[in-house]
Each structure stands twice: as C-alpha cells, then as structure tokens.
Amino acid sequence: MSKVIVLGSLNVDTILRIKQFPSPGETVQAYEKTSAAGGKGANQAVAAARAGAETNFIGQIGNDGAGKFMLKSLEADNIDGSYVSTSQSVGTGTANIMLNENGQNCILVYGGANQTLTVNDVKKAEPVIKDSDFIVAQFETPQNTAVAAFKIAKSYGVTTVLNPAPAPNEPIDPDLLRLTDLIIPNELESASITGIEITDEGSMITTANKFITMGINNLIITIGDKGAFYSTKKNHDLVPAFKVRAVDTTAAGDTFIGALVSQLKPDFSNIQSAINFAQHASSLTVQHLGAQPSIPHLDDILKTENVK
C-alpha cells in the first residue's frame, strides 16, 4: 500500500445543474442545487485513500462551519488532517460549479484560506513527508508552499507529483519544475506551459521532450475520453480511456491522480497498469454527480477493472 501525502486545497462545492451554460448577459434557471466537499487537493486525497493508499493532507481551512465540514469529510475517509491549519482571518475556500445536461462544467473558485497557507505550515509536516512514497501538489495553494514541500520530499527520496491545475496565470517557478519527478497536466494545461498544442502522438512526444528541458523526465497528459499519454526515460505510449456515458466530469482528473499514486511504484515501473487502474476509477467518477461523492472505493474499481 502506497503512503501518499497531498498538499492542496479544501473547498466546499456548490453544484448548480442547468440545461445549458449562459451567454454573456444571459440569466438561466438552475433546476437543482447541492453542496459537497471538494477542492482539487481534497479530491485527490480522497481518491487515493479510497483506492487503498495511506493518506495524509497538508492544507488550510477557515475558522468556520465550512472548515469543520471539510475536516470531518477527510476524517470520514481515514485521511490524516493533522497538518491542516486554521486561518483566523480568511474563510474556507469555496467553489461554485455549473453543470450542464451533457455533464460538462464551468467552475468559479474562491481560494480563501487555501491561498494563505504558508511555507512554515508546510515545514511542520516534514515528519510525515519524509515517511511518504509520494507527495502530490496542485496550483490551488501558493506555489512557494509546493516548492518548500518538494524540497523536503527530495531530501528524503520521496517521489514528487505535480498536477499543474488550474493552469496558472503566473509563470511556474523553475525550481518547482526541477523538483518535480512526475507532472500530470491535461492537454490544455500542457499547452499553456509548453506552448505546444496537443494534436497527435508526435506533438505529445515533442511535449515530453520540452518538459525534459525544464527538468521533468516523467510526464502523463490526460486527454479526456481519448485516454492518457505517458512518457518516461524507458518508454512512452497512449493508454486508451474506458468508454462510458459522462453525467458529471467534476473531479474526474482528481480521481485519476489520486487513484494513480495509490498504485504507482516510485520507480514508475508499473506506470501503464497504474494508468489503466486510474482511468477506470475516473470512468466511474464521471457516471455520478458531485466531486467527492462520486469518487469510487477500491472494491468498486476492482469489480469492473477489466471491463472496457
């Protein structure tokens, strides 16, 4: 069983179901409203834990009911939240998700306490970072906290995984890229970082070589219903996706990443089978509504893992 620590965001999601996305200036009616635990970091941690990984979390909440709700949601999945700090000045992060009838979403995120996480908060987690197999970070917390966490991880030989999402508006710290063992963007995030549009396998290989010049030797690009492309020092390939009817794509990518690190070996020797497992977990997520409520457990994944 992998030991995973996630540095990331904790958001309370509000999901509004609508027939179609509004045009600028247009008002549309939502026919259903629900709330659930979310945040890219929390989603990835839940996915890892439900897929069998021993999981810890580094993050920050506000001193409010939403923060208490997020802590309880971590505890419900046996995720250790000992290194989740509490801001006394900023509220817990939130996300408002518009979901149309085709299962596609638009998301507005308020970072809140996620954005006031500090390097000192991260350094307190050194005892658990050093005992992990993987540390995972995204861009819903400050980049300098990811740099600090990855420096600690690398000093102990812990494998670092960066999900550069959402695509940053500011340049990525070159130190963070050099400290990253495996980067997992989707095709749009990849293009925003490298300037290379993903159109075919040739462009994926070119992208992998571009990331190598940035200091990252291992890459997975998730390409929606087409699957996932991976490249390591030893091999590259496109692993096809499972074909399902999507109801809600929220947390699909987060499920992929959490499930992946629950199975992946730190030397990436089983990367293709780990991707296949992760894509199956993600295919189950998109068939249900909500972020964390839709993330599958290990038993559910194993039941139909070989059915595409």
Image (spheres, rainbow, N blue to C red):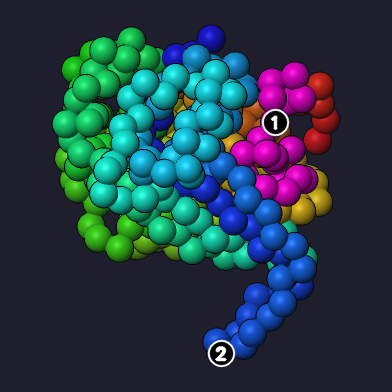
Helix, strand or loop status at disc 1: loop
Residue beneath the point at 69% across and 20% down: 298
**Could you tell me if residue 252 is visible in this image?**
no
Front residue of 290 and 204 = 290
283 relative to 3 in the view: left or right: right
- Cα–Cα span, label 1 and label 2: 38 Å
Residue beneath the point at 42% across and 54% down: 166
Residue beneath the point at 63% across and 50% down: 35
State whether residue 63 is above or below residue 124: below
State whether residue 173 is above or below residue 81: below
Q: Amino acid at mark 2?
A: Gly
Residue numbers of the magenta segment: 284-301
In terms of sequence position, does the residue under pointer 1 or pointer 2 come before the other?
2
Q: Callout 1: 10 Å neighbours few (<14), some, many (20+)? A: many
Front residue of 148 and 28 = 28
What is the number of callouts on the image?
2
Q: Amino acid at mark 1?
A: Pro
Residue beneath the point at 50% across and 14% down: 54
Q: Callout 2: 10 Å neighbours few (<14), some, many (20+)? A: few
The quarter holding residue 200 reads bottom right
In the drawing, what numbered circle is on residue 296? 1
State whether residue 11 is above or below residue 15: above
In the drawing, what numbered circle is on residue 25? 2
State whether residue 191 is above or below residue 263: below
Location of the C terminus (image quadrant): top right
Provide residue 206's location: percent of width, then percent of height.
40, 51
135 relative to 270 in the view: left or right: left
Front residue of 72 and 255 = 72
Provide residue 65's location: percent of width, then percent of height.
48, 43
Helix, strand or loop status at disc 2: loop
Q: Do the CB atoms of the residues marked 1 and 2 lie less than 8 Å apart? A: no
Provide residue 253's location: percent of width, then percent of height.
56, 44
